[in-house]
Image (cartoon, rainbow, N blue to C red):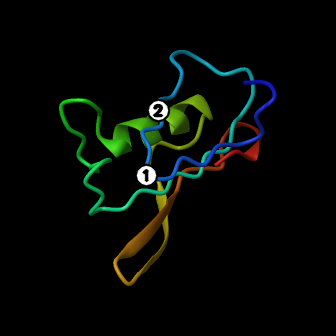
Amino acid sequence: MDSIAAIAPVSSPSFAPPGQIARPLPVYDLTGAADPLVPLDGNARQPPVQKSVEQWARLDVCPSTPKEVSARDGARVLRYGPGRGDSE
């Protein structure tokens, strides 16, 4: 992952690597609550979206509790960070 500066999964499972990462990797995850292919609560084939988000936050050594940045028209923005190297 040394050549990747950041990732931004959009309506896609985001499987975090096990263990540790060599350097911080900023992650922007965008998932819709009504998405039938990537349900927020997961299904038999994939874990809940929140589990993946929390794993990336741990890898970047971010606080375990996010801050709500905004909530408008049914959309919420949560931010984990700052973490190692000011990652979010």
Extreme residue toward the bottom, this view: 73
Extreme residue toward the right, this view: 3
Q: Are marks 1 and 2 in contact (CB under 8 Å)?
A: no
Q: Residue at x 53, y 35 (%)?
A: 56
Q: Left or right? Give the position of 2 relative to 7.
A: right
Residue 10, compared with residue 44, is above or below; it is: below
Q: Position of residue 42 (x, y in %)?
A: 24, 41
Tell me which amino acid carries mark 1.
Ser
Callout 1: 10 Å neighbours few (<14), some, many (20+)?
some
Q: Is 67 in front, or is 2? A: 2
Callout 2: 10 Å neighbours few (<14), some, many (20+)?
some
| Circle number at residue 29 | none
Q: Left or right? Give the position of 61 relative to 35.
A: right
Q: Is 65 in front, or is 17? A: 17
Secondary structure, mark 2, is helix
Q: How many marks?
A: 2
Q: Label 1 belongs to which residue?
A: 11
Extreme residue toward the left, this view: 44
Q: Label 2 belongs to which residue?
A: 55
Q: Position of residue 49 (x, y in %)?
A: 36, 44
Q: Position of residue 44 (x, y in %)?
A: 18, 31
Q: Is 77 in front, or is 41? A: 41
| Camera-side mark, 1 or 2 | 1
Tell me which amino acid carries mark 2.
Gln
Mark closest to the chain's N terminus, 1 or 2: 1
Q: Residue at x 42, y 70 (%)?
A: 76
Q: Position of residue 17 (x, y in %)?
A: 54, 21
Q: Residue at x 43, y 52 (%)?
A: 11
Which quarter of the figure is the N terminus placed in? top right
How far apart are the two marked residues, 1 and 2, measured between alpha carbons?
17 Å
Residue 42, compared with residue 46, is above or below; it is: below
